[in-house]
Image: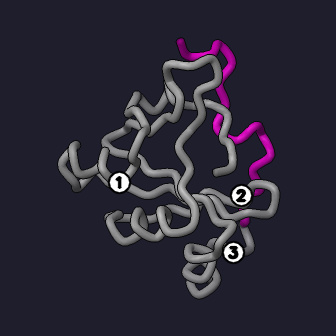
Amino acid sequence: MIPQRLSFIDGNLDRGDGLRRDEDALTKLQTHGDTRIIPFWHNQVFINGLEGTSPTLKQCCGEEAVGIIESASEILFLGLNEGRALFAADLSHLEESAARQQAIGATLIGLRQGGCTAQSC
C-alpha cells in the first residue's frame, strides 16, 4: 500500500544554484561518501519496502552509488538535502532486468506513485 501523502525530499531540497554550472564540483560530489544517487528507469523509480507500511525511495550511496553512476547514461544534479548532494541516475538505456540488478531488492513503480519520503541508506 502506498501512503496517501507522498513527497520526494520532505521539502528540504536546496537546489544548489551555485553548484549547477561548476562541473568540477559536481563531478567531485558524485563520488563523495555522503552523496545519494536515485536510480530511475523509463519514468519509474525504485522503491524499498513497498509491501510494508513505510516504503522509501531507493537511494544509493558508497560502492552501490559508484556502480549506478558507472551504469547510468545521464546523471542529473537535483540539489542538496541536509547538506548532502542528491543526484538522479538514468538507467533507461539498460534492459529492465539489468536496471533491476543495479537496484537490488527494490521494486520499480511509476515516478508519480513513487514520490515516497527519501531516507538515508
Which residue in the protein does label 2 denote?
15
Identify the mark nearer the N-term, 1 or 3: 3
Query: How many C-alpha atoms fall within 10 Å of the one at disc 2: few (<14), some, or many (≥20)?
Result: some
Residue 11 inside the magenta-drawn segment? yes
Q: Residue at x 72, y 67 (%)?
A: 17
Kind of residue at badge 3: Leu
Question: Residue pushed farthest left?
Answer: 95
Name the residue: 64% across, 37% down. 8
Left or right: 63 as drawn, with respect to 12: left
Residue type at the position of mark 2? Arg
Q: How is the image coloured?
A: one colour
> Does dot 1 land on a helix, a strand or a loop?
helix
The residue sitting at 36% across, 71% down in the picture is: 70
Give SS at disc 3: loop
The quarter holding residue 54 reads top right
Q: Provide residue 51's location: percent of width, then percent of height.
A: 50, 19
Q: CA distance from mark 2 to mark 3?
A: 9 Å
Side (left or right) of 75 relative to 43: right
Q: Nearer the viewer, residue 2 or 19?
A: 2
Residue at 56 percent of width and 50 percent of height: 59
The span from disc 1 to disc 2 (Cα, nearest Å) is 26 Å
Say which mark, if any, is on residue 102: 1
Q: Are marks 2 and 3 in contact (CB under 8 Å)?
A: no
Q: Which residues are magenta?
A: 1-16
Up the image or down, 43 lies above or below 22; here it is above
Residue designated by label 3: 19
> Where is residue 67 drawn, in percent x and y?
40, 67
